[in-house]
Amino acid sequence: MLLSRRIKPLIPFPALVIENSEKILVVADLHIGWERAWSESGIYVPSQADKLRKKLLSVVERHKPDRVILLGDVKQAITRLSMEEWREIPKFFEAIQEHVNEVIVIRGNHDGDLEPLTPSTIRIHPSSGLTIGSNPRIGLFHGHAWPSPEVLSSEILIMGHIHPVVWFRDRLGLWTVRQVWVKTECSGERMTSAYLKYLNLKTNGDPQAAFKLKTGLHVGDARLIILPAFNDLVGGVSINRLETRLLGPILRSRGVDVEAAEIYLLDGTYLGKTGQLQKFLTDLAQS
């Protein structure tokens, strides 16, 4: 499942490490405070904040990264901060900071008003993301919005946002949901065409040339990895069910080969490609 010798998934955790001149731990979608939404619906779920903090600390202590990058959706509330978030998120950041040189947040669609909850030493990047290294250059972003041209032109793209899962059905007809990693290829031509359309710019028949003229950057055929959510209780987009939704402009751009995406369980087990898994589910439904 390695994208390159510098990028390794930390089996069995929904996290990966990037190794350049330093070791960088990347996780996505903690959604601290998500229990509040359930309680408002009359369903009581105990706070998972302490569990998430200990889980991430165990990964940090085992792999000893220099930096931690949180790939968006650190918190749950979108319109207003909950008491749970006011209490737990500062505690979370303070605990992580004690073990690494730097903590970076790339803003997700749930991360509005995150600044009051974070120590001043936490670096918060916009949703357009950031890049790391060269040969290959790695672009990191949450996934709910277009990344910056610099990120989009990276050789390897890493995102979260959709919380990918697969659904299994046993012989008794009972369904089980499992988190998965997604790895696939991207078409630079299709992604740039969609990006320029988003900016209301003409492609003149050659979107990559138009993108380079506009930004000075070339978007090639990149590789994409989608991280599972670090919070394993938040649900997600089913990769193999027929009603699969494509969330975010990158996946909706038709520049990502969703059908040929390789799907892996958290323990590293290779399940097959999306198209194969969807066909298998169709065959089950018809049998």
Image (tube, helix red, strand yellow):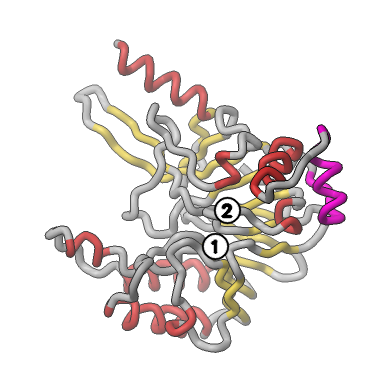
| Residue drawn at point x = 52 percent, y = 85 percent | 98
Residue 71 is labelled as 1
| Label 2 with label 1: CB-CB less than 8 Å | yes
Residue 285 is labelled as none
In this rendering, the answer to whether 215 lies above or below 287 is: below
In this rendering, the answer to whether 169 lies above or below 27 is: above
| Residue drawn at point x = 31 percent, y = 12 percent | 286
Q: Is residue 220 left or right of residue 62?
A: right
Where does the image place residue 276, in percent across and percent down from the top left? Answer: 50, 22
Which residue ends up furthest to the bottom in the rendered image?
Answer: 120
For the record, the magenta segment spans: 205-219
Query: What residue type is disc 1 on?
Result: Leu
Query: What residue type is disc 2 on?
Result: Met
Where does the image place residue 245, in percent across and percent down from the top left? Answer: 43, 37
Q: Mark 2: give few (<14), some (14-19) or many (20+) Cα within 10 Å.
A: many
Magenta run includes residue 208: yes
Local secondary structure at mark 1: loop
Counting residues from the start of the chain, the first of labels 2 and 1 encountered is 1
The answer to which image quadrant residue 170 occupies is: top left
On-image quarter of the C terminus: top left
Where does the image place residue 40, in percent across and percent down from the top left? Answer: 18, 63
On-image quarter of the N terminus: top right
Residue for badge 2: 159
In this rendering, the answer to whether 82 lies above or below 43 is: below
Magenta run includes residue 45: no
Local secondary structure at mark 2: strand
| Residue drawn at point x = 76 percent, y = 51 percent | 153
Where does the image place residue 25, in percent across and percent down from the top left? Answer: 59, 65
**Mainly helix, strand or loop, the magenta region?**
helix
| Residue drawn at point x = 32 percent, y = 73 percent | 50
Q: Mark 1: give few (<14), some (14-19) or many (20+) Cα within 10 Å.
A: many
